[in-house]
Image (tube, grey):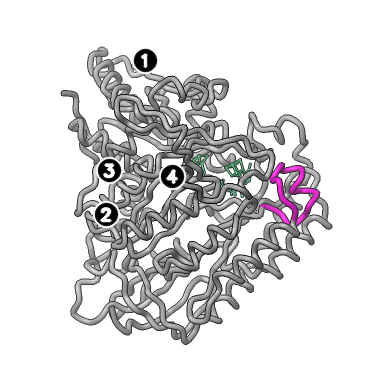
Amino acid sequence: MPAGRIYLETFGCQMNELDSQLVQGALSARGYSFTPDSDAADVILYNTCSVREQAEQKVWSRLGELKRAKDARPALVVGVLGCLAERDGADLIRRMPVVDILCGPGELDKLPALLDNAVRTRAALPPDSARASARQVALQGSASRRSATLAAAADDLEMLDLSRAISPTDHSGSAYVRITRGCNKFCTYCVVPFTRGAEVHRPPEHIIDECRRLADAGVLEVTLLGQTVNHYRFEHDHATAVAGVTQPQKGRAYKGSHHRDALEGERVTTFAGLLRRIHDEVPSIRRLRFVTSYPRDFGNDVLEVIRDSPRICRYLHVPVQTGSDRMLRAMNRGYTLAEYEEFLARARAYLDAPGRPLMLSTDVITGFPGETDDDHDATMGLLRRARFKNCFIFKYSPRPGTVAFDRLPDDVPGEVKRRRNSELLALQESISDEVSRAQVGLTFDVMVEGVSRKALRESGLTHGEIRRAAGAVALTVAGRTVAESEAHDHACAGEHGCDARSHVLAPAPEGPVQLSGRTDGDQIVFFDAPAGVDAARLIGRILRVRVERAHRLGLHGVITGN
Ligand code: SAH
Ligand code: SF4
Ligand code: F3S
């Protein structure tokens, strides 16, 4: 059996983090091992993101650095997985001959076979043949959106999730579970429908079974993943099975507002129905979260289920993108600002409660083609009224292959984008500060996620090792915090409002070990570990913490119980 040590680094969103975990499980089962040290690896895999140019730049520079490593170690195998591989395809190989494997996010089930082949081929090449090809490619190609063949063929990608290796020792109390893959929305700026393919919903039984297995292994918090989770819909009458495995079902095109009537019927599982089933059937999951919600078609059925289910978090991430109706149309978002604000009011009416406030967050793109000062002011106005807990602000980045790239000139000058970006940031910072301060005096359940940098230093790891390990292997000392910090650094790079996750690694003052965690409203909380307790052992536990002071980056509190 071929084997080797793999260095795996992950860029991009939670979907990619989950993909990396699944890939790691599948490759471990074939005898590969994982190392946080890229210099010690036989195989280097980057799981990439393509959502903005800056995300791609990071990968390009990593690949550039590998040229020398590959000259020195011709047997090194380099693989590019994920959205950049899918978007750039063969061009990527032309630009970067160091790449041996290209594997799109829709083809990751094929990765073990590709890697075995590449490792064998590389090993068989003469030692001086650094440039010779061991090339293995699996891309979906945007022309063949995977769902077209779903009715006829087995959806092998489902097997990657189904064969997920779950063990009580390799999680930090929290886990992602995919409910929907791909996206049918085609917002004019976005690459995701091209890189991740058509929307496909997993059978509810598979999702619930995965949640149950995670809970049995000690996971307390599950985050359901999808680009538009509230579009989830599985029609049992149309379910098909291949070799005894129920197949995922393709989503519909989202042109009309049919989801209004998608109430839970006997034979349909909607998002509301799915949430209720997971909540009720797997009660040992103490926290159920989901991202990302699409602003339109967010029915009262979902809000009612959240309201009536104590273990579903009071947190909604609902990207608005812009406060201008004109820009919303140009982005093909399919809702008006008034509809978005009506949704916010409805969500608050259902879910905001004394002592358990509903927290909302959003994404904004600034400098979309044609955006005027008036459009920008409309977005500022929305932020003032909506009072989001935080807002991720992105400067528009034209993406090849999208409608906006082809049809709308990127005409907002860089300096105007930067100015609008900083105005939005400054405004949101002051709002985040106020939202945080309003929590002082409340006591929350807090899921412990990490220890401060001081404690990490005491673990003997250097900062570089922590960063490199972040995308590669779960760190038992601070697993999730470090990984999130890396993901955040990646997403942030100074261009949007920071929500403090990267600050978990900020130096702590001398004294007790500082822990960080999250409320069920997704607010970051810092607090001291009790004296004499091994702080790392508290990771993944839920503790009661009373908030004593607060600022825009988080809350500071004291433990009052568990
Ligand atoms: N499915 C989610 C978002 C996925 S991408 C949704 O629809 O809400 C995450 C965020 O990246 C988006 O919400 C958007 O704000 C941002 N984004 C996507 N494409 C972008 C682009 N071309 N330029 C700048 N930001 C972009
Ligand atoms: Fe992209 Fe829009 Fe789909 Fe979100 S809903 S992934 S922004 S196309
Ligand atoms: Fe995620 Fe980036 Fe792909 S945000 S879906 S990894 S383009």
Q: CA distance from mark 2 to mark 1?
A: 37 Å
Contact check, label 2 and label 3, Cβ < 8 Å: no
Element on which disc 1 rests: loop
The residue depicted at 28 percent of the width and 58 percent of the height is: 219
Question: x and y percent of residue 344 in the render?
Answer: 64, 64
Q: Amino acid at mark 3?
A: Asp
Q: CA distance from mark 4 to mark 3?
A: 33 Å
Which residue in the structure is indicated by mark 1? Answer: 133
The residues colored magenta run 321-336
Which of disc 1 and disc 3 is earlier in sequence? 3
Which residue in the structure is indicated by mark 4? Answer: 179
Q: Nearer the viewer, mark 4 or mark 3?
A: 4
Which of disc 1 and disc 4 is earlier in sequence? 1
Q: Amino acid at mark 1?
A: Ser
Question: x and y percent of residue 198 in the render?
Answer: 54, 32
- Residues 233 and 15: in front is 233
Q: CA distance from mark 3 to mark 1?
A: 25 Å
Q: Is residue 1 left or right of residue 131?
A: left
Which residue in the structure is indicated by mark 2? Answer: 171
Above or below, 456 relative to 333: below
Contact check, label 4 and label 2, Cβ < 8 Å: no
Question: x and y percent of residue 476 in the render?
Answer: 24, 57
Among the 4 quarters of the image, the one containing residue 1: top left
Which of disc 1 and disc 2 is earlier in sequence? 1
Q: CA distance from mark 2 to mark 3?
A: 21 Å
Element on which disc 2 rests: loop
Q: Nearer the viewer, mark 2 or mark 3?
A: 2
- Residues 185 and 119: in front is 185
